[in-house]
Image: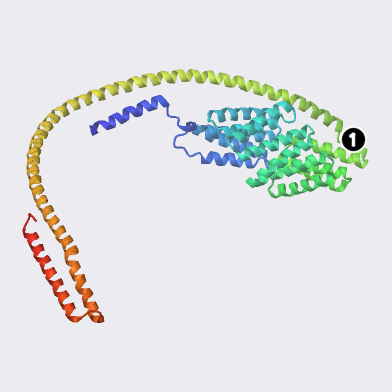
Amino acid sequence: MKKFFPAIFFMFFALHIYANGVDGVNGVIGQDTDAVIQLTKQAYEARLTNAQQTVNTGDKALELATKLNYNSGIAEAYRVKGIGQYYMNDPEAAINSYINALTFFKKANNKRGEAKVYNNIGNLYRDNNYGASLEYFQKALDIGHEIADNALVATAYLNLGNLYSREKSYNQALKYYKQSEVIFNVLHDSVNLIQCAQNRGVAYFSLNQLEMAEQLLTSANKRAKERDLNETVASIDLTLALVYIKENKFEIASKIVAEGLAYSHIINDDKLERDFEYTSYQLEFKRGNYERAVHYLSDVYLLDSALQKTMLYAQINIYEIKHKQEQQEQQNIINDQTIKYERAQFWGAITAACLLLIVIGLLISNVKRKAKTNAQLTELNGEVSRQKDNLDRVNHHLEEIIDERTKDLQLKNKKLSEYSSYLSHQIRGPIATLKGLMNLEKEGLVDKQECIVMMDKCVSEIDEKIIEMSDMMHDPGK
């Protein structure tokens, strides 16, 4: 039988391959995905320092993950690319990357990844469509609670705070910022703690609580510089300059604007540069330098900014709809491939079934040979049984002999028991009397002659008892 085990194993393995395919988890078999994870991590960490580096590193991660057919890695690579494109003010490319990421996260059944993308898309809609942004942030928050992921929950709270801040609901925004800050403190997430401090500073500035705003923004700015978060430093400088302008600290405001412009050039952020141009206009206008203020062309900038915001939402929607259509076409292609694959599975199963029939035939032949061997073994078992019966009869006779000897021993044991009892009750009495007489004589409480007479009587009694005992031992009838 053992020689057929390899054939049977091969047959069932073939059936398993045809039934389940060979992709494994996320399409990866024995491949080391650490390199992909490391690349996406590096790309994400560079988002606030060099957004272009985020995109470039994301491309490398995407290329490697695609070779490995590693769905979660492909999805995360698309996501970090989208983040880089978002910071580079390229919303069309960002939404395309985010939707690709969402597709692959769903394919890999990665709920945490899905929630991250929902947060990212919510940020993309934040300045243009309050309803759409709130919907995506709420999806991310629901998943965070569902899978008990504190980092996701904290990020969703932070994003909801930003959304309410854009809607000028500053107290509601501060409530969400505080909730996110508590969780980020527990997680020791220094980057997001800086973000919380910055956002709270912006909210307090909007509430005209300038001292609190300046304190938070200055602290956040210092920590952002220590970590080389160029994007964060530039955006903090933008609000901090407005604080100093309101406080009439024009020299400090001018230095902050110059610093912010320098950081905007480093990260190549055109939108931030335009924002600083407008802030420069505000500064010069507040100073009373109207001629210089005119050079910043504030009216042109404001018109351009408003037009850009109007067009952005339409562009994002177009890309989203286009991408969904492409997804549907890809799904149709996948369905066709699935049908072909199922046909191949069917013919593979037929082949495996034929192999199974051959193995069954070999097994039946083997069973017949073993049936003959079993008949011979049965005959030998009969002979063994007869010999066993003879042994049982001998054992039965031995048991009868043992029973007789056991009864004899029991009788003798009974006699010994009776002798012991008799000795205990009949002999012990006279002896006790003798001992008592001896004690009385020592104490002088009895006459010596009288004591001798009584002792003689006790000895005679003991003698009689001993004779009776001897008779009992030798006469079975007594």
Name the residue type under label 1. Val
Locate residue 113: give its quadrant.
top right
Q: Nearer the viewer, residue 111 or 282?
A: 111
Q: Is residue 246 left or right of residue 309?
A: right
Residue 405 shows up from this direction = yes
Instruction: From this view, report whether residue 472 is shown above or below residue 191.
Output: below
Q: Residue 377 appears at what percent x and percent y?
A: 12, 33
Mark 1 residue crowding within 10 angstroms, few (<14) / some (14–19) / many (20+):
few
Instruction: From this view, report whether residue 129 is shown above or below residue 412.
Output: above
Residue at the spot 68% in from the left edge and 48% down from the top edge: 227
Q: Residue 313 appears at what percent x and percent y?
A: 72, 25
Locate residue 281: give its quadrant.
top right
Residue 238 shows up from this direction = no
Tell me the quadrant of the picture where the C terminus can be found. Answer: bottom left
Instruction: From this view, report whether residue 82 is shown above or below residue 431.
Output: above
Instruction: From this view, report whether residue 106 is shown above or below residue 233.
Output: above
Tell me the quadrant of the picture where the N terminus can be found. Answer: top left
Q: How is the image coloured?
A: rainbow
Q: Residue 401 appears at what percent x and percent y?
A: 7, 47
- Residue at image mark 1: 294
> Under tag 1, what secondary structure?
helix
Q: Is residue 48 left or right of residue 307?
A: left
Q: Residue 376 appears at what percent x and percent y?
A: 11, 31
Number of callouts in the render? Answer: 1
Residue at the spot 36% in from the left edge and 25% down from the top edge: 15
Residue at the spot 60% in from the left edge and 36% down from the top edge: 58
Locate residue 183: give its quadrant.
top right
